[in-house]
């Protein structure tokens, strides 16, 4: 860009000198040719690469492109003796190219920031020593050491040490995550504080950072509907305008006896105006900017076509567990029949201490204290009912209503469809009940509200849970439809029906955790994987990956998509309107070369600057 800028400034200096000598000074003799010489020098300096590219492309059979149009138009102007106009067209064309390079550079910078997550080295323990190696040379099972301030080179599990991890490059979140022994850490994160040792669980080629980089690098290969339209449009548009320019130059002089020079000049102006740079450059740049802006927010889009589809979202279908809820059960309510809540929780936690069921784990977490195994004997898990055990010599029952009925315990049934009710009895006497429910994600309710605010008309939840808890979550979040008790194949079938019901040009977006939802993610118009850090199934099956666990990012993604598509549409309408107007004026003889320069370079610069707005996603 620096060399191009110097070349443009030098050409402008020659052009200014030529313009000044021709219009401000009276020259005679040999000196009268000096403005022409300076204009030709300006033209050659600004346009030599355009002329060479045009010749090379013609030899390759690629005739109709912007280089060809610029070459024909300016060489024709030179042939007519319009030296200053020819130089001006080339100079301002290069100014437009400079703006394009700057705009592309700005878009690539956002992608380059993401590329910085790629680690250069890894510290590996080998033979009692710490060896610095390339991440590609580290095998699964190797022990790596990550020092404070270093980037995590590979996906691994912490063996020793505690730290805080900066995951902003992956998730777009500024808050660090605490990590301790047993936690999984992902490549691309930055170790902010403590020294940690970790065991590698994936080779570098399969690591999170490699998959992310591969996905972003390949995103531009999947073009949107708008981009494909522009490509097809330019393929037919350019030959058509060249043919129209030839007819404009030849037909009036040959058939009507009009002056050839006037109509040839109009044809050259027609060619300059018709150059499709504004469309061919700004439309892909808009989508490239949208993808780059989304990546900075922790939203990875696999292609422009998915941004296009996401912008037309009318129906959003959610999986429940792991998407809208945390998938972690917790005690929601404690109802003792006698005694204290703490005593009831202690009794239930001790009874359930030998079970690994999620409900049992939630009771132990609620208890908080360590379990004294000596207090519990003869623990038995009764399928479909619950658990029985001797706690301090007392027979304790923890389970559902069937458990109480089968043991003849008199109890008060609780009607609470928001979760699972665990009844507790000791020596046949009812002690109370504990209501346990899956916890909603923090951003789940704002996400559903945000979707309605951006015009999504239908929100649906699919879950394998029972009807009570499922519909309770849907009501609490404001989701309009909920289907419960579904197996994975049932979810696919339900999505098929929803796809048939949606408006013709609208799209259906399915949001899941990417582990059990791969078939549905693949079937939807747009599959969105939520909280997909380290999830192979999510990154493979989804079209769009939200890297953190925040459902609100879906609303952000839709806003980014709509802004991007809107910018592309603005550029199409603006460019075609201005060019169409100037083309008509040029054909009628009311347009000068300066108007043509604005209709080409000016429109391209404005469209490119407008496309750069797609990069700004901070306020969406």
Image: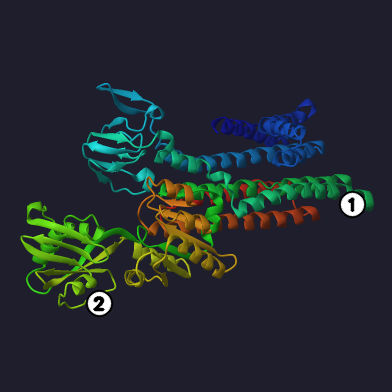
Name the one closer to the observer, 540 or 209: 540
**Residue tagged 2:** 415
**Residue tagged 1:** 252
19 relative to 302, above or below: above
Circle 2 crowding by C-alpha within 10 Å: few under 14, some 14–19, many from 20: few
Task: Tell me where residue 231 appears, x and y as whole percent.
Answer: 67, 48
Task: Tell me where residue 217 appears, x and y as whole percent.
Answer: 51, 40
218 relative to 44, above or below: below
Q: What residue appears at the point 61 percent right and 42 percent down from the top-left corner?
A: 96
Does residue 369 appear in this view? yes
41 relative to 272, above or below: above
Drawn side of residue 437 relative to residue 221, left or right: left
Could you tell me which quadrant the N terminus lies in? top right
Drawn side of residue 427 relative to residue 127, left or right: left
Q: What residue appears at the point 31 percent right and 23 percent down from the top-left corner?
A: 131
Drawn side of residue 134 relative to residue 25, left or right: left
150 relative to 503, above or below: above
- Distance between the Cα atoms at labels 1 and 2? 89 Å
Could you tell me which quadrant the C terminus lies in? bottom left
Q: What residue appears at the point 59 percent right and 52 percent down from the top-left corner?
A: 224
Q: Earlier in the sequence, mark 1 or mark 2?
A: 1
**CB-based contact (under 8 Å), mark 1 and mark 2:** no
Q: What secondary structure is found at the residue carrying circle 2?
A: loop
Task: Tell me where residue 7 appears, x and y as whole percent.
Answer: 61, 31
């Amino acid at each position: 860009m620096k060399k191009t800028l110097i070349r443009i400034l030098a050409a402008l200096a020659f052009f200014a000198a030529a313009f000044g000598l021709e219009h401000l000074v009276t020259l005679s003799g040999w000196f009268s040719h000096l403005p022409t010489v300076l204009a030709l020098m300006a033209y050659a300096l600004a346009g030599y690469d355009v002329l060479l590219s045009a010749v090379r492309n013609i030899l390759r059979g690629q005739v109709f492109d912007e280089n060809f149009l610029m070459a024909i138009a300016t060489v024709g102007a030179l042939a007519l003796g319009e030296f200053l106009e020819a130089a001006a067209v080339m100079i301002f064309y290069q100014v437009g190219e400079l703006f394009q390079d700057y705009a592309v550079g700005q878009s690539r910078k956002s992608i380059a920031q993401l590329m910085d997550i790629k680690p250069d080295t890894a510290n590996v323990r080998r033979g009692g020593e710490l060896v610095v190696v390339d991440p590609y040379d580290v095998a699964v099972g190797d022990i790596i050491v990550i020092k404070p301030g270093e980037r995590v080179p590979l996906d691994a599990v912490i063996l020793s040490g505690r730290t805080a991890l900066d995951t902003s490059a992956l998730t777009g979140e500024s808050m660090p995550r605490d990590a301790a022994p047993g936690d999984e850490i992902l490549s691309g994160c930055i170790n902010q504080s403590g020294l940690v040792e970790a065991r590698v669980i994936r080779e570098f080629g399969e690591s999170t950072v490699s998959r992310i980089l591969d996905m972003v690098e390949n995103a531009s290969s999947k073009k949107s509907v708008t981009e494909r339209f522009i490509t097809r449009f330019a393929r037919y548009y350019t030959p058509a305008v060249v043919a129209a320019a030839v007819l404009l130059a030849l037909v009036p002089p040959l058939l009507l006896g009009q002056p050839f020079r006037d109509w040839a000049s109009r044809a050259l102006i027609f060619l300059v105006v018709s150059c499709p740079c504004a469309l061919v450059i700004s439309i892909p740049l808009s989508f490239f900017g949208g993808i780059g802006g989304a990546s900075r927010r922790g939203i990875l889009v696999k292609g422009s076509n998915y941004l296009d589809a996401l912008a037309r979202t009318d129906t959003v279908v959610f999986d429940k567990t792991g998407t809208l809820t945390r998938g972690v059960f917790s005690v929601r309510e404690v109802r003792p029949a006698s005694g204290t809540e703490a005593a009831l929780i202690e009794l239930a936690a001790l009874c359930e201490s030998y079970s690994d069921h999620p409900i049992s784990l939630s009771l132990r977490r609620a208890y908080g204290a360590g379990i004294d195994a000596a207090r519990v004997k003869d623990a038995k898990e009764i399928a479909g009912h619950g658990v029985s055990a001797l706690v301090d010599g007392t027979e304790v029952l923890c389970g559902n209503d069937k458990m109480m009925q089968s043991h003849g315990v008199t109890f008060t049934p609780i009607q609470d469809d928001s979760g699972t009710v665990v009844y507790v009895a000791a020596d046949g006497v009812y002690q109370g009940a504990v209501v346990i429910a899956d916890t909603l994600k923090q951003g789940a309710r704002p996400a559903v509200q945000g979707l309605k605010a951006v015009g999504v008309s239908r929100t649906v939840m699919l879950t394998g849970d029972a009807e009570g808890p499922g519909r309770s979550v849907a009501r609490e979040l404001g989701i309009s439809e909920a289907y419960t008790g579904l197996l994975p194949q049932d979810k696919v079938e339900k999505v098929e029906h929803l796809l048939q019901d949606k408006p013709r040009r609208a799209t259906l977006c399915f949001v899941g955790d990417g582990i059990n939802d791969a078939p549905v993610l693949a079937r939807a118009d747009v599959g969105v994987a939520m909280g997909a850090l380290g999830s192979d199934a999510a990154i493979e099956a989804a079209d769009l990956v939200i890297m953190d666990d925040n459902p609100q990012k879906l609303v952000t993604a839709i806003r980014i998509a709509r802004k991007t598509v809107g910018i592309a549409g603005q550029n199409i309408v603006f460019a075609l309107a201005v060019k169409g107007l100037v083309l008509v004026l040029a054909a009628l003889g009311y347009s000068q070369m300066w108007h043509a320069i604005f209709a080409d370079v000016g429109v391209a610069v404005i469209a490119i600057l407008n496309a750069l707005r797609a990069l700004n996603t901070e306020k969406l």
